[in-house]
Image (cartoon, coloured by chain):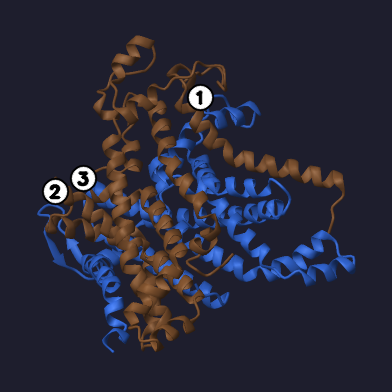
Chain colours: A brown, B blue
Amino acid sequence: MEQPRHLRILRDIAAVFVTFVFMFPILWWALTSIKPISAVFDKDRVVFFDFVPTLINYAVTLFGLSRSGIAIDQGIGMGVGGAEAYDSRRAILDSVVVSIGATAVTMAVAVFAAYALSRMAFRGRAAYLNWVLGQRFMPPIAILIPLVTIYKDAGLRDNDSLYGGYLGLMMIYALMNLPIALLLMKSFFDDVPKDVDEAAMIDGATRWQSFSKVVLPMVRGGVAASAVLVFIFSWTEFLLSLFLTTSIRTVPVKIQTFVTSTGNEWGFIAALGTAAAIPSFIFILLVQRHLVRGLTLGSLKE
Amino acid sequence: MVSEHPLPWLLPASALMVVFGLYPLLYAIWLSLQRKHPVTRKLSFAPSYNWSKLLGDERVWNALGNTLVYTSAALLLQLVLGMLIALLLDSDRKGYGLLRAMMTLPLVIPPAVTAMMFLLMLNGSFGVLARGIIATGLLPTGFSILGTANTAMAGVLLAEVWQWTPFMVLIMLAGLRSLPKEPFEAAAIDGATAIQVFFKLTLPMMSKVIAIAVLIRGIDLFRAFDYVKVMTDSGPGTATETLTSYAGRIYFGNADFPYASTIALMTLILVIFVSFVFMKVCKVKL
């Protein structure tokens, strides 16, 4: 159905406008991250572009430079505060370790289970799928409270050793992401005709060989898409990370510490926030094709 | 053939769900049946203590009310906006693919960061959004949207709606693109108006897609925490306190594990009950 020309142009304008409205907070954030403090806190007017851009916020949060030194030089910055408090390199590392670890654990357990649930007929299969789905219904707070005690007893929480804080958070992220990874992988396995395994097994392959040599390579794209989604959900998680660990701090938690009694360090918050969003932006654009399937736990395909 | 048995395949996932899911859940149930002595901090078995306390606790009802308002308002706004934007962006013409891709970006920002973003933009004295609203004369100068009981919830919802409307847009777009062409061509020949086509054809044919989107979003909305925690810390007072944030406050404020567990379990029971009814009534399955 061809629309008249003026309607088409009107629609184009509306589409661009709506998208811009949704992009605005992101752009504003990025803009705030390169503003000097005086431009952020201007009470007389809203500063859009008439400021001298600065990279001090990135220098402090991402490279650990001392803020007070730079601030005195350039006459910007507020409060005093130690430089270490805003150096976020450790938090970024913590987030990367936890997210990659959680993704690896989730995918490792999900792929096998998804294959069995897609390929094998057994009693309790439907019940098992419901059990998996049930994890998605669980409010994290319900398992968080007992988990703190369990972790304390097991030394997974208040432990300064490398595995201490990391392992505990990774495992609970793996549990939280299991439904999406498992159901998504199952939907990808379901797309591969059963004849494929049967043909392989008639040719003498064992079940394991037909899985690892034939079917798994066919769903590589699905594995990648699921892993990306699990990574993003782990990367952005807040509640569990806030309450469950003491020896490590992921980025969403770290950023909250920039809210201080002398005022919020908006420049640092914006810089770290922008930096934290960039890997997710790249990843999400890579898996556009499978995004809907992923977000609906494999129910809807595009 | 040993490997034909599903057990070895399911074992790792089952172990994860038992150790980190089932065991804590049973522990939470056990906790909810204990009473924590306020002075000695010892636990004693008192199966009805927390549950009867819960029923008489006005803050639980307030939190439940806030959770319901939050969930239904966000669902409605996201659904309507999501559908409208999906219809707008559903075009094969040049550039629309880019707009659709850009539309997915808000989804992957950490919600705790989104909350900070809106905290800045809604600041009464220098926030760009608050200043914009104040400039229209709707609000007095320096008005604090998040610091006023009547408007705090709306402020939090703004962040929620901004971040998750793209979720609905994406799902609606997928739904729109999977619709068969023929009924629409027939309707065009019959001279149906765009409004008629939407309500008589598009909407009914999209009902399954919409139901799935509502279910998934509803589950997440019901355990709302991040925006509330960061933007208002459940305040002012208890104006934006949700069930999850109340349980968190009880747990970390009073260290009353048993009561916090009880509130968390009630949230779980409500989520399961409402989703179950919804799935039955709307005949959807995930």
Comes first in the chain, label 3 or label 2:
2
Q: Nearer the viewer, residue A291 or A160?
A: A291
Residue at image position (38%, 25%) is A57
Task: Provide residue A301's location: percent of width, then percent of height.
Answer: 56, 67
Residue A79 vs A5, above or below: the answer is: above
Q: Are marks 1 and 3 on the same chain?
A: no
The residue to which callout 2 is attached is A159
Q: Is the residue marked by circle 2 packed among few (<14), some (14-19), or many (20+) residues within 10 Å?
A: some
The residue to which callout 1 is attached is B126
Q: Dot 2: what SS?
A: loop
Query: Which numbered disc, 1 or 2, marks the residue closer to the eye?
Result: 2
Residue at image position (49%, 37%) is B118
Q: Nearer the viewer, residue B16 or B131?
A: B16
Q: Dot 3: what SS?
A: loop
Q: How far apart are labels 3 and 2 at the CA level? A: 8 Å
The residue to which callout 3 is attached is A246
Query: Which numbered disc, 1 or 3, marks the residue closer to the eye?
Result: 3
**Residue A55 visible to an observer of this rendering:** yes
